[in-house]
Image (spheres, grey):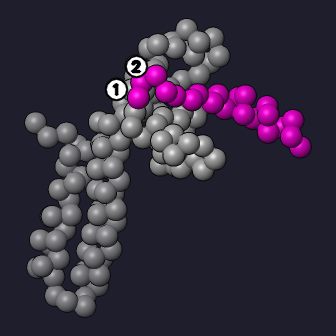
Amino acid sequence: MIKPVQRVVQYPLLLRAIQSCCEPDTLQAKQVQVALQKMQTLAEYVNEMQRVHEQYAPNIDALRRQNEVMFKEKGLRIDIRDLLLFAHVQWLNTEKYMQDYVIFVFQTLILLLPRTARKECKVLLPLCTMLAVMQRSY
């Protein structure tokens, strides 16, 4: 059975078929072109999030299970479904083998994982602590 998210990736194919039936340089052709561009952007995002989920969700879930008590005490929540932002970053002032990281921003914390996700190497930054540090620096 196809999940709704999997259908989103098929919409650009449907829009291309519709586009081929439109007369060139018409309002309908332009509208289909705009819709196609937006759907392609959405499909790329869905594919990227699926890849991130497949690649990092097991590590994040294991980290959550290992630190469950501490997370509850501090009111932190780490769940791949609550991911706000992720990015590949390079730490410049460290050893070459420790430079490549993936950063995950959740509502309550920031997680740094090495790009070659070794389970024993991680950095957790609770946002409440970071906000307190930022407020003191003013």
Residue marked by disc 2: 62
Residue 84 seen in the current view: no
The spot of residue 81 in percent (x, y) is 41, 33
Where on the picture, by quarter, is residue 2? top left
Q: Quick check: 50 left or right of 105?
A: left
Tell me: residue 37, above or below residue 73.
below
The spot of residue 32 in percent (x, y) is 25, 74
Q: Which mark is residue 81?
A: none
Question: Rounded to the nearest whole Å, what is the CA distance between mark 1 and mark 2?
Answer: 6 Å
Where on the picture, by quarter, is residue 94? top right
> 56 or 81, which is in the foreground?
56
Most distant residue in the top direction: 69
Q: Say whether marks 1 and 2 touch (CB < 8 Å).
A: yes
Residue marked by disc 1: 58
Q: Residues within 10 Å of mark 2 (few under 14, many from 20)?
A: few
Tell me: residue 116, above or below residue 8.
above
Residue type at mark 2? Ala
Quarter holding the C terminus is top right
Residue 112 seen in the current view: yes
Say whether residue 129 is magenta: yes
Image: magenta residue range: 118-138
The spot of residue 116 in percent (x, y) is 39, 37
Say whether residue 123 is magenta: yes
Q: How many marks?
A: 2
Residue type at mark 1? Pro
> 11 or 84, which is in the foreground?
84
> 127 or 11, which is in the foreground?
127
Secondary structure under tag 2 reads helix
